Image (cartoon, rainbow, N blue to C red):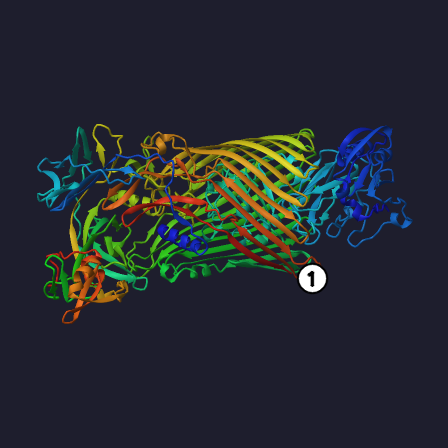
Amino acid sequence: MYNYQIIWLSLLCGTLASCIAPYEPKGVTPTSGMLVVEGNIIEPYGTTIRLSRTKALNATDSYEHINSALITISCDDGTRYYTAELKKEGDGIVPGTYTVNEKIVFTRGTTYTLNIKIGDQQYQSNPVTPLHAPEIEDVNYITRNDGRQVDIRVSTSDPAGEIMYYRWACEEDWEYTAPEYATHRWNPELKVIEQLSKEGVNTYYCWDKGHSVAFALGRTDKLASATLKNNTVLQLQGGTTRFLYLYSVLVKQYAITKEAYDYFSNLQKNIEDAGSVFAPQPTELSGNIHNMANPEEVVIGFVTASTETSRRLYIPAEEVPGMNVYYYCEEEMTGLSSQAIDLYATHWRILNRIDRDKYIWLLARCVECTELGGTKDKPDWWPNDHQ
Amino acid sequence: MNPVRIIPIAAALLTFAYGGSAQKAISLQAKNKPAHEVFRQIEEQSGYTIYCIPSETDSLLLTVACENSTPETALQMAFQGTPFKISTFEDKYLFILKDKQITAELSAGYLTPLSRPGEKATSSASQLNPLELKATSENKVYTIGNESSSVVAGKLTLSGIISDFKTGEPIAGAVIYTESSLIASTTDAFGFYTLQLPPGRQKLLIRGVGLKETQRQVMLFESGKLDIELEEQVYSLREVVITSEQLANVQSTTLGIERLRIKDVKNIPTTFGEVDIIRVIMMLPGVKAVGEASSGFNVRGGSTDQNLILFNNGTIYNPTHLFGFFSAFNPDLVKEIELYKSSIPSRYGGRISSVLEINGREGNKKEFGGSVSLGLLTSRITLEGPVGKKTSFIAGGRSTYSDWMLNLLPEKSGYKDGSAGFYDLNLIADHKFSDKDNLYVSGYYSHDRFRFDADERYGYSNANASAKWRRMFNQRFTGSLTAGYDHYDYKTETTENPFEAYSLTFGIDQAFAKADFTSYLNDRHTLDFGAASILYSLNPGKYLPNDPESLVIPDYIQKEKAIESSVYIADRWNIAPELSVEAGIRYSMFNALGPRTYNLYSPNQLPREATIIQTEEVTASKAIKTYHSPEFRFSTRYAFNNDFSIKAGVNTLSQFIHKLSNTTIMSPTDTWKLSDVNIKPQKGLQIAAGVYRNFMNNTVEASLEGYYKTMNNYLDYRSGAQLIMNHHIETDVIRTEGKACGVELMLRKTQGKLNGWFSYSYSKTELRQNDPRVEKPINKGNWYPANYDKPHELKFAGNYKFTQRYSISINCEYSSGRPITLPTSKYEYAGGEFVYFSQRNQYRIPDFFRIDLAVNIEASHNLKLLTHSYFSLGVYNLTGRENVYSVYYISEDGKLNGYKMAIFGAQIPYLSYNIKF
């Protein structure tokens, strides 16, 4: 509601004057350098710990990531012990990101503790009891605002009533097409015009991916038989390539404790509700990680432990026509192959051949799908044979 | 027969009179003294009364030197060489007129009684029919009692009702006093006054907000009754902003009281042209609001729930409409507003910061009438009139059509589904059973609804009904019995996802009864005493499925019941004319009642679910917890003379009902909580002192008041507190203490073409979490500024009248920016960017400045016209300054961006049209 209200008020004012303007408060004493630990212990795979530090609000440099930490996860019965290693990707590392490569198997009745050593500082989380995430019963979607918004929704329940708080993460993949299908292409390396085909080499089909930022949280403590039905986990607006051909989202579900829920929802409130007319005072909740030698040190983050369940949803573009984007591609050129180098250099691309050596050229974004942000990297599980 | 003596003097000459009593020869030395000062000295020494036309003599400086001369000679000397002529009459009156000499010879007929209808003169009070006889004339001497009765030494009691000549409505807050001595009385809400006077000839002067200054003359032989009818100022535009009585400011014993008449409020420019009582209240010194869109207000550092808001005796829990843009009172049904900031009379209790009393009008007792007002956002209609001879009513309704504003929103916004609306209805009736018994009945209902999108809907209502029976037992003893019922509720509901659709309701019901008595013991002592009781019944929350398919589990928080009772007695004691004291004690008791189930917590630990040591269940309807304590109300005044006094006072107060809200302002979804085993009552203490001085013949009032205030057991919230549907709220709150201090300077001009006020206040309000059981208190347990702590505030409200038809009003306000909590650090988490807040309220938004302008036009003054219309057009926020309401960061696509929000970031023009018939 709060968020709506800001918008509502600003629109109300907008009819009279602009009321909301970008602003950087002056005279704020910045603080920085607090340790931020993002840690989710996940069974069986996927445990990821990210270490970084806070920076001053007005700082524009990139975040400081900690790459030299020693991270272990210990089980309170002493039977198991996992090490998290810096995550490698290609030749390099993902800064500040540590993963457990071993398979984790939770034993009932035990707790897990995250231990982090940075230099001579030792940090530890409170012991965390792993939770078992129920299966996702359904993932569906609904269109809103006359089809200009798509909400991805999840249904789940825990009839045993043990799990009442959830966190979801969404992995999005989508296939889209260039506005126009090009039959030919100027190859700038070989300096020849090549033929393209939908079944073979083409510049028509592309894939892009995204992931949900921030949190999708849910609770069933006030709902019958701990059932969540059609709970929105992701809201998508038009204006992107998501719904040009085929969209897919993998919803991953984790069970969390009430404390974790309160912590995460407070983080969210602090940036979503702040400033509105009825906004509550922002507050900081303590996380569950502390410096062993100095309990006063502020450490941001809440370590959770849960199994992961997931479910995938596909949405073909024709089902959500309102989310389609219109690309302006009326402008065209007619050019001979001898003009190709020049045309190519000025961002023109071939659409098709109209005569022996005569081609229709369009702007690159109209025929080359990679111009719209995606790549030709097709996920290996993608359910069609497009190239 | 003993006729009422009539002194016939042309009314035009009576615009101003300086009074006195019997002496003759005078000695005077004055050099370039203002004329009125010279007149005053002559009157004092001679006992003559001098009449003049102030506009002719006000600016004159006179020089005179005389020894043992007659007043006439002295004045002739003073006016030598000027066109002014001096006339005497009956060796008691002097007239000063430009180029005119009046012949003070009376035709014989003047001395025989003139019978005007309704002024049948009789000789004895007992023979007067007070229903018919009302003193309307300034020039007539009304005889009270029988001349032949032996004049007793000592004091006689004169009492009566002061009412409006045109509508018959009683006039509250008028001061009636004798000029020669410091005997004064203020009329109560029913226009009733009592004076203790020496026998003999008395001139009573009557002053009041928006009243034409007037006088009545009496010859007192015995104690008796004199009802007085007053003419209000003919042109309502004349006095725009007058608060409190001119003399009461200096003469009353109370501190920190503000009184406004509704017509003074009506000229003050407001947003969208809506006459708004609470916005005007916010223009007074010592009253603050967090921002422009909040009708909740803070008085001298108190929080928004510490104000007792009474509308015709009913308690209003949410005084706002349309998320705080408007206040919930229809201005056409309001007569006057009294705000007690410091000395809270003993008859009030239950809130620790202030009392805002809004008194409704009584219907016109003489003829039917009404008014219609058309504004940009709302319209209202009022009807009033007599029903038979003894009853009158006034009814009003107001409704909004604000949805059009939402319809202006662009189609793309997605918020076209939003809507908002409100209405309120009032009915006030009064019936006069006899001269001694009056009954007043009042009903009020207001309803608000709004939604920002198609999904979530909000609504809230206030409802009040009360009846008051007032009896004048005798001249010295009056009393009233009041009983009523107050209700407030709100409801939130969602419908979009049928499986999660819920409705949430909250409600307060309270039934109250109270008896108040005033006894005028003698000229030294006036006793006020009484008792009151409130029975509370609270529905703290009901959470229900709002769709047949909904999975929401119905959840009910157990009802809370309590009874709050009090008795009080207060003495207004005039120790000497200069020194008076008002001392009162109020004993209040609060019983939280069963049936209820509640937790007991380990006493040395903060209440948490983990520290529950026992759960008690009380099934019977009996007291489960009792709090009781005395409250002291004391104030004293020392008057050096009629124009200059000093005052001091101490008040202690308790509050048993707490608002649960962690927003900075009043929000429509705030809930309230009664004190119980785990929630202690709030306690307040205020010490105040001030200096009061009237200048320029009482037309300019100045006051300087300072105060120091403490508050205890004020509720603040733990991080992440859940305030709605919490079955044990004590585990989410923290007791906080507060202190406030400040100085308020007020300058007010009440008459003339230019009138209005200017105020400056400096104040400081700080809070602290001092509970040693709290592990991480806010700001490490140090004092931190409250949300509404705005140290410097300058406010100006003024009206300048060009002619009787045109006037302009200007409001101007400057204040320091309010404190806000800003993030100091940011970080990445879960793929998004988040902020880290350090200390609460350590930063301030930019200073606030706004100026508003209104032009008021009365279309016609012809009294014979059937309808009278009145236009008001104006501009709110004339300079278009974007006053920052809040500063915040929001995450957009995972990136943080800082914004500032202004609620009114441009000039807002308005026009309103009012018709009276």
Mark 1, other Cα within 10 Å: few <14 / some 14–19 / many ≥20 = few
Q: Secondary structure at mark 1?
A: loop
The amino acid type of the residue labelled 1 equals Leu
Q: Chain of mark 1?
A: B
Residue B822 percent across, percent down from the top left: 36, 39
In the displayed image of the protein, which residue is found farthest to the bottom? Answer: A355
Residue closest to the eye, B724 or B780: B780
- Residue A181 visible in rendering: no
What is the quadrant of residue B443 in the picture? bottom right
Write down the quadrant of residue B251 in the picture: top right
Q: Is residue B320 left or right of residue A312?
A: right
Residue A187 lies, in percent from the top left, at 12, 60
Q: Indicate whether A341 appears above or below B653.
A: below
- Taking A103 as reference, is B319 left or right? right
Residue B500: which quarter of the image?
Answer: bottom left
Q: B533 above or below A143?
A: above
Q: B480 left or right of B735? A: right
Residue B14 seen in the figure: yes
The residue where tag 1 is placed is B865
Q: Is residue A333 above or below residue B880?
A: below
Q: Residue B635: horizontal and vertical position, in percent?
A: 59, 32
